[in-house]
Image (cartoon, grey):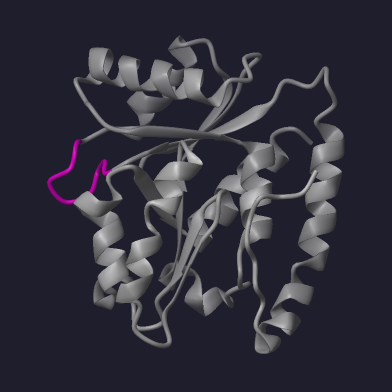
């Protein structure tokens, strides 16, 4: 079916969109691999852990906790609360609720948990309005949310954009390119603060690494 995202490429970005062609073929191959009998892969994203005064979640304990919940093929990425796992259950909301409850009970940490299937992550990557060069990966953020309404609620932040910043909101994810750096962006600051409490952000490098882990694990 159609991917529910608005993706208006500017003329100068058409070349960048063509660069994604080889990636899309990989996505199609990955989706072909996910036959009905294949247990789906998921990505779990924790909000605001292991940064500043945020809650502390050791990744080794997080991995063990997920395995204790019955998930298999568990791997973590970086120290910012990212994990990839396999499960027979297909409800992203149920996975998120289970992980959040176990985090509170096992580690005493209360935080938002967003779970996306690997297939949905591939669609989010395809929704990206630009394909940033590697030098810009740390300046390109993707905001994830459990519900489309939480993303659409971010649209007023577009008024804070300062050229050449770009902030694009879709029903799958929101995308922020801040060439001057995340710390210099008013939108970036808002996403990481109270206005972004219903979403969690990852830079493009992390998003691509998470997808790579999810796709490689089913090969």
> Can the viewer see residue 64?
no
Q: Is residue 181 left or right of residue 7?
A: left
Residue 198 image-quadrant placement = top left
Q: Nearer the viewer, residue 56 or 101?
A: 101
Magenta stretch: helix, strand or loop mostly:
loop
Q: Is residue 206 left or right of residue 123?
A: left
Whole-percent x, y for residue 183 in the image? 25, 72
Vertical side of 6 occupied by 43: above or below: above
Residue 121 image-quadrant placement = top right
Whole-percent x, y for residue 206 in the image? 49, 55
Vertical side of 123 occupied by 137: above or below: below
Specify start and end residues of the magenta stretch as a single range. Answer: 48-55
Whole-percent x, y for residue 3 in the image? 71, 50
**Residue at image coords 44%, 35%:** 114
**Residue at image coords 44%, 52%:** 152
Vertical side of 188 occupied by 59: above or below: above
**Residue at image coords 31%, 66%:** 188
């Amino acid at each position: 079916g159609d991917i529910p995202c608005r993706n208006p490429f500017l003329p100068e970005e058409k070349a960048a969109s063509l660069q994604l062609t080889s990636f899309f073929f990989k996505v199609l191959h990955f989706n072909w691999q996910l036959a009905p009998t294949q247990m789906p892969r998921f990505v779990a994203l924790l909000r605001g852990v292991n940064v500043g005064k945020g809650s502390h979640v050791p990744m080794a304990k997080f991995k063990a906790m997920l395995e204790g919940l019955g998930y298999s093929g568990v791997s973590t990425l970086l120290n910012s609360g990212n994990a990839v796992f396999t499960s027979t259950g297909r409800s992203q909301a149920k996975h998120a609720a289970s992980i959040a409850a176990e985090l509170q009970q096992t580690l005493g940490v209360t935080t938002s948990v967003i779970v996306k299937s690997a297939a949905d992550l591939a669609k989010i990557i395809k929704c990206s309005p630009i394909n940033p060069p590697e030098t810009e990966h740390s300046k390109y953020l993707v905001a994830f949310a459990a519900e489309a309404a939480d993303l659409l609620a971010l649209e007023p932040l577009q008024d804070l954009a300062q050229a050449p910043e770009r902030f694009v909101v879709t029903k799958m994810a929101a995308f922020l390119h801040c060439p001057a750096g995340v710390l210099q962006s008013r939108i970036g600051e808002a996403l990481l603060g109270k206005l972004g409490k219903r979403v969690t952000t990852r830079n493009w490098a992390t998003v691509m690494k998470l997808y790579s882990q999810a796709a490689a694990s089913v090969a």
